[in-house]
Image (cartoon, helix red, strand yellow):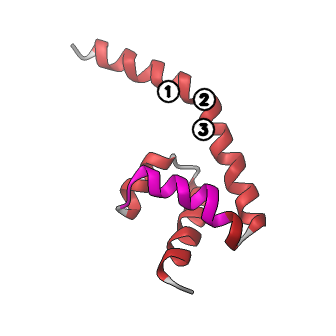
Amino acid sequence: MNYINKRVTDEALYIIETGKTVREIANIFKVSKSTVHKDLHERLLKIDKKMYKEVEEILKYHTNIRHIRGGESTKRKYLNC
């Protein structure tokens, strides 16, 4: 298994185990958000379709709640002023 395939698999296993966001995974694996996105949306599909489906559900969940997270972040920002 080459380095990229191992990273993609490790990222996928990590998101399945923890439910972390793309941003958090990027920080942990020391790559950009764009790289994580490409890894989980394109490369993983070619490596493991079953794992891809699990990851896709988690990513859809994060997409569905991002407006709530953004609102909470803005609220915290103004409460700390």
In this figure, which residue is indicated by the disc labeled 2? 65
Q: Position of residue 39 (x, y in %)?
A: 55, 61
Q: Are marks 2 and 3 in contact (CB under 8 Å)?
A: yes
Amino acid on which the number 1 mark rests in the picture: Arg
Read off the magenta span: 31-44
Q: Are marks 2 and 1 in contact (CB under 8 Å)?
A: yes
Amino acid on which the number 2 mark rests in the picture: Ile
> Camera-side residue: 32 or 59?
32
Helix, strand, or loop for circle 1? helix
Is residue 23 in view? yes
Helix, strand, or loop for circle 3? helix
User: On residue 69, which mark appears?
Assistant: 1
State which quarter of the image contains the C terminus: top left
Is residue 16 in view? no
Q: Position of residue 47 (x, y in %)?
A: 68, 73
Mark 1 and mark 3: Cα distance apart in space: 9 Å
Local packing at callout 2 (Cα closer than 10 Å; few below 14, some 14-19, many 20+) is few
Amino acid on which the number 3 mark rests in the picture: His
Residue 51, above or below 60: below
